[in-house]
Amino acid sequence: MKPKKILSVLMAMLMALSLLPSLVFASEAQAVKLDGKLKIKGTASVGSVLRAEYKKVIPEGITDEDVTFQWSRKTGDELTEVGKEKTYTLVQEDMGNRIQLKITGNEELGFTGELKALSVEVVAEGETPAPDEDNEDDLTQQDVQIPEAAGEGASDADVDVQGDTQDTDIPEAGDDTQDANIPEAGDDTQDTDIPEAGDDAQDANIPEAGGDTQDTNIPEASDDGTTGAAQDIPADTDNSAIQINNEETLNIPETTDADAPELTYSAEVSMDNSTGVLDFGSAEAGYTQLPGEQYVTITNTGTGDLNFTSVSPEHFMVQDITEPLKAGESVNVWVQPREGIPAGIYKDTITYTTEEGAQASFEADFTVNEAAQVTDGNGEDTNAPQDQQKTDPAPSVTSDVPAGTALTFDPVTAGYTELPAGKTVSFSNQAGTAEAQLKAVLDAGAQAAFTAAFSADTLAVGATESSVLTVQPVAGLTAGTYSGNVTVQVNGVDFATYPVSLTVNAPAAASLAADPASGSTLAFDSVKEGYAAAPDAKSVTVSNSGNAAANLTAVLDEAGQNAFTAALSQASIAGGESAILAVQPKMGLKAGTYTGQVSVLNDGNVVFTYTFSLTVAPADVFGLSVNPSIVDFGTVKAGYTEAPQAGTVTVKNEGNTTINLKQPTGGDFEVGALSAVTLAPGESATFTIRPKTGLAEGLFDQDIVVASDNSQTSVKAILTVAKAEVKLTGITKPSQITGLANGTKKSAKALKLPETVVISTTNGKMKASVKWDVNGSSYDPDSTDAQTFTVKGTVTLPSGVTNPDQISTIVSAKVSVNGRSAVLADPSGNTIAGIDPNAAYTTATKITVTANGAGMNNTDPGTGDTRYIPASWKVLEERKWEQAPYSATFRMAKAGSYTMTVVFNQQKYDGSNWVNTGAQDAKQVNFNVSQADGQDLTPAANRTDANQKNAVRTGDNTPIMTFVIILVVAVICIIGVVVYRKKKK
């Protein structure tokens, strides 16, 4: 082939390769809908952090960035949103409630749909949450995935690996250990035994699926002593998906050092009941409601860590232990009967086995009774398939009391002479085709206290008479509760089980107790003679814990009767009841000490005694005296500058009780502090009295009160002020007034001009009123400029002050008023109205929003004022506002979470116009839109790919740069060939 043709072929191949990306990215990939099962990871206790777990979420590889989060607190049926972050930390308010997590696919990243998960009830910090019977995703339990019976819907997604995968000890095989072929799933489960590994183990031929799922039993221990664990392998399991320690190879434990201490491996089982057996009771064949879960505790009693293998009993579901159990640690696991177990009595021994060879076993019991048959006129079971209705003769026993009904006897009292009436159940075989042999079997609990017998042990075919089972307690039972089970067998097969119980009460007798204990002293606080209310009663609580009534009386001794009363709240108290004995002093007791004793009797017999005492102190006597009782300061002239010398007064406690004096006050007289406030009987205190200076002409006669809380007296103070001439010697100029706000009203009060000025006289300084001529000033309250001006005023002299020297009474005050300050808008006042982040919007909802800028309502701006004006808004694309109104109406064509952003421009007033400053402020509101019911899911016409800001996600992760480089090389080669051919020509 010629070189040109070879080159042409290479060029064509390169061009074809370069066009592959266009085939991948040419069309928009469909959004991927979230599916599978979401779980919450964490512990449901206050202070713990919860997060999403995506192990079972489809598609695989989902991360926190691909979804949005909504954490809610579930109280009853009410949900309250508590967070939208990737994680959520449990707080005190969550305790007692459950937490729901909802994740929603991020449509911008190519995901749709939502998934939810619900935690168990949140407990206090440090406590262990209880398991949740209704939620298999219980945060406190390890995940246990029980594969469903193979059939429609079975898939690899049913296999869930929780926690860290542990190293798996593989039994040593012989020279040529081969793989075991795992059968495909079918409808029925069969056990297939895989042979032990030997020197030359061949492939274990396991039958292929003929519509049957087969359980594969792992080989027993090899020479090294390790033990395999039987596992149920789901149908169609992808072996490539099974990982061990997330590695492709098996980890074989290394040989330990010979000098290392030898580890021991052992485990034991414990449970709450003392029988050592989990008894799930009984159910009727075909039951759909499973008995409740029961728990056992498995403890590592050895010195080495235990790694438990999977366990799958035939008739019970159990919780696997997926995490290593360290020495001394324990774990609780649940056990529950499986659904659909056929009729029979099941006493299964369930054994947990570890990879180290340790075992822990316990027994689980469950009885499935035969379902009651419905027969037709020929005695055939109408519920059986047509090909089974013609069967061999068989009894058809029915009873008038359903199986499992409790036969509870009324309580009796120990020593009873008459047996309680027996409980009866009637059985018939009227529809049967064979004779029925009846037998009543009592378990150990029932055998100790009951008898059970049939009126007839045999029911003939078609017999119309019934055989009556009578269950009756035996005589001579002591006090206590007796219970057990009576099982009815038909032809040797368990047919129905009835729980029986009887309570035998102890003989009737009162059992009394007292609080405080008998012999205690009831001491009362002392009171004073003449007390207005009796001291609070002292009480004794008498309780009867027996089963017979107690007849109580309270008796005071002779001394107690003189000063006290004693009464019971009730004279007769039955078992479980209480009575209150109240002892209280009488009113009007004289000073002295009173004692006594009270006895509590039951049916005339003393059962409790108490002593009591009260001290009555003498009544309080209060009295005060003062010396001197009159203090006369004589006469002074008006305008005096020095007050007369102070006088000293002595006050004395004349009573018999300590008192607290109150500080006297004097009005026109100055009263000094008391030398002492607290006075014991007979003690004294002093204080001083002195006239105040500057008193006007006249007579000052005042009673100064000296008092305590309970008594008072007074001392009279006298001063005469004679008339004196007073002359004006000067007027003090008022201080300058500054800092007044712009626009202050033009009035003396608004301008803070003083109402009085200080004048100097021959009798000292005084205050004189002044009248201001505000209107005569130059002040303009309408001006926005700063102003300083003078206001004049005329002083009016006080009465008695003369002005013989003709001193000017005109004064002036300088006043300063500030200029106007600029009004600056606060960007926090920028708002978006009309959209609610908590509202339920759909793709059919029209949303109208209005933007309001701070300072937009400034209708009388001044130079330097600022405001904010809405400039643009954006949800998926930006739109601008040129002028008011600043509102927008839109509808989202696609469900999802969105953000509304509004940008505000700052403007400044220059004296005539508002001018943009270049500063901006942005406000955002997040909102959610759901798909409207019945709406066409086709995107709206205006939502084209051109409007999308993010690249389309196709799900193809092929690197594009490789193809781009190939395309560039191909183009260069083509250009080179064209140039080369032109030159040749």
Image: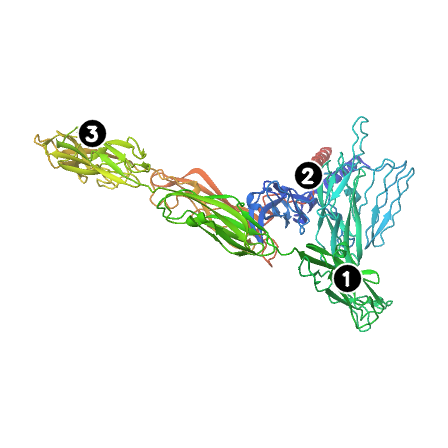
Q: Residue at x 31, y 35 (%)?
A: 681
* Residue at mark 3 to residue at mark 2: CA–CA distance: 108 Å
Q: Is residue 293 left or right of residue 820?
A: right
Secondary structure beneath dot 3 equals loop
Give x and y (percent) for residue 143.
Answer: 71, 45
Name the residue at the left extreme. Answer: 804
Mark with earlier residue (3, 2): 3
Query: Mark 3 highlights which residue?
Result: 646
User: 9 or 978, which lies in front?
Assistant: 9
536 horizontally vs 507: left or right: left
At numbered mark 2, what does the secondary structure look like: helix, strand or loop?
loop
Q: Nearer the viewer, mark 1 or mark 2?
A: 1
Can you give x and y, in whole percent of width and height, for residue 316 in the image? 77, 51
- Who's the residue at 51% across and 43% down the image? 520
Locate residue 255: give its quadrant: top right
Which residue is tagged 2?
960
